[in-house]
Image: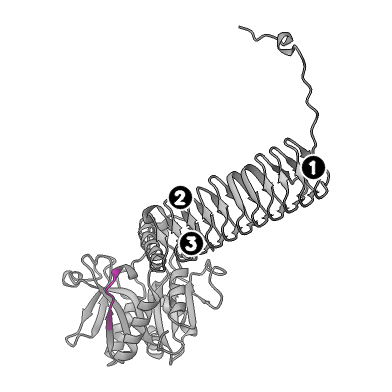
Amino acid sequence: MLRVPAPTVLILAAGEGMRMQSDTPKVLHPICGRPMIGWPVRAAQEAGAGHIVVVDGPQRRLEGALPDGVELAVQEEPNGTGDAVRSAAGHIGAGDTVLVLYGDVPLITAEAITALAQAHEESGAVATMATMELEDPAGYGRVIRAADGSVERVVETKTPGDATPEEEAIREANTGIYAFAGGDLIDALGRLSSDNAQGELYLPDVLPLLRADGKLIAAHVVTDATLTLGVNTRVELARVRALAQARIQREHALAGVTIVDPQSTLVDAGVEIGRDTVIEPSTFLRGRTRIGERCTIGPLSTLIDTTVGDETRVVHSYLDGAELGSGVSVGPFAYLRPNARLHDRAKAGTFVEIKNSEVGEGTKVPHLSYIGDADIGAGSNVGAGTITANYDGANKHRTTIGSGVKVSVHTSFVAPVRVGDGAYTGAGSVITEDVPPGALGIARERQRNVEGYAERAPRKQR
């Protein structure tokens, strides 16, 4: 938690992101299952910031895309970072400590935010900027230090003429991340000038104004440059996504999860995985997936918004919105669709598709079957090629199969139909009526053999 009481965090996200070549706002492009803007927002929340404001453009394209409690300010015209912060002035109190982040700098962490805020408080400065030493700082604003080590100003280098060759040779760069005393920030924003190559209001230009007022400007060096990487193109998005993925997998590994081949595995930011679970190669865990302890997931499996109990195995299968108990076996080549619920020790085997159905404890659907809109009790066995015919062309209907039922191969249940506990079906049956408990349901035409048919059958033309 931050030592600063209720800091205000501003996240600048009004840029058009033209270089992304996309109709989607840049900061809404996903990174490991979370919108780009969601990463700095989450970091600010985890750092203990109770007041978070995102600055959007005039089209308000982020409206409705932000977490509850995050406020929206609007920059009416694209007039630089200084104007963007000024657009949020109504959210800044004179006594606030204000942190400025960027929506397209998603890898910033709660720890980095906390460190900046604490350095700002301990320095007694009215502004503290996060800086970094780069081998190639091209495109970044250069930090100009005074003789006493404090920050004198920042020189932008985006366009020719903004900086001298000597200034461009400086390797200490501005990350764009700041801590300010709220009252001093608001005062300096009102005095900004657009006298620069781009004719915009630069946020770093408040620093020489504050220094001219006799105020101290401090710097806090960030040693991990990846925390401040920005995203302007899809190439940069891919780089940041890879770093975010590595961070996610590292956290799971440190918590006791084995990821056999990290390079072929994708784990979204919101996924939960229990201890001693093994994630086999080429497995994708997406959305709100939650996996218990001592499971084996994969290889070649995708789980989306799926809940998995302890000691469950999923092999070479695709699960979307499913719910599995403990000790469940799935796959290979199974497809579990939304609201497929398999209770403890149930099985969905090879080439089995299940959707919107309950499969009871210990019940097995071993292979080559479709179970849709059905409720199956405990301890039943569903033979190969079983189909629940749930759609009559206009409406869906449910099939109910009791506990301890033995469904023979190639049985079709034409819903709505009920099969009682302990009942059987004959192989190849089309069940259209209820089967009482303990009964055998057979619905097929008797076999008839036509003697001599082969000799009378038409011969194939040679």
Marks 2/3: CA distance?
15 Å
Which of the marked residues, 1 or 3, is nearer the chain's N terminus? 3
Q: Which residues are magenta?
A: 219-225
Residue found 22% across the figure and 65% down from its top: 136
Badge count? 3
Q: Position of residue 352 (x, y in %)?
A: 61, 45
Residue to which mark 2 is pinned: 299
Instruction: Give the number of the disc on residue 377.
Output: none
Q: Quadrant of residue 320?
A: bottom right
Residue type beneath disc 1: Leu
Q: Position of residue 110 (x, y in %)?
A: 40, 77
Residue found 74% across the figure and 9% down from its top: 456
Side of 192 relative to 60 (left or right): left
Q: Is residue 141 above or below residue 94?
A: above
Q: Is residue 194 visible?
A: no
Pointers 2 and 1 in contact (CB under 8 A)? no
Task: List the single residue furthest toward the top.
Answer: 462
Marks 2/1: CA distance?
40 Å
Quarter holding the N terminus is: bottom left
Instruction: Give the number of the disc on residue 440.
Output: 1
Quarter holding the C terminus is: top right
Side of 81 relative to 212 (left or right): right
Side of 189 relative to 150 (left or right): right
Disc 1 packing (10 Å; few <14; some 14–19; many ≥20) = some
Q: What colour scheme was applied to this rendering of the protein? A: one colour
Residue type beneath disc 3: Arg
Front of the two marks 2 and 3: 3
Residue type beneath disc 2: Pro
Residue to which mark 3 is pinned: 294
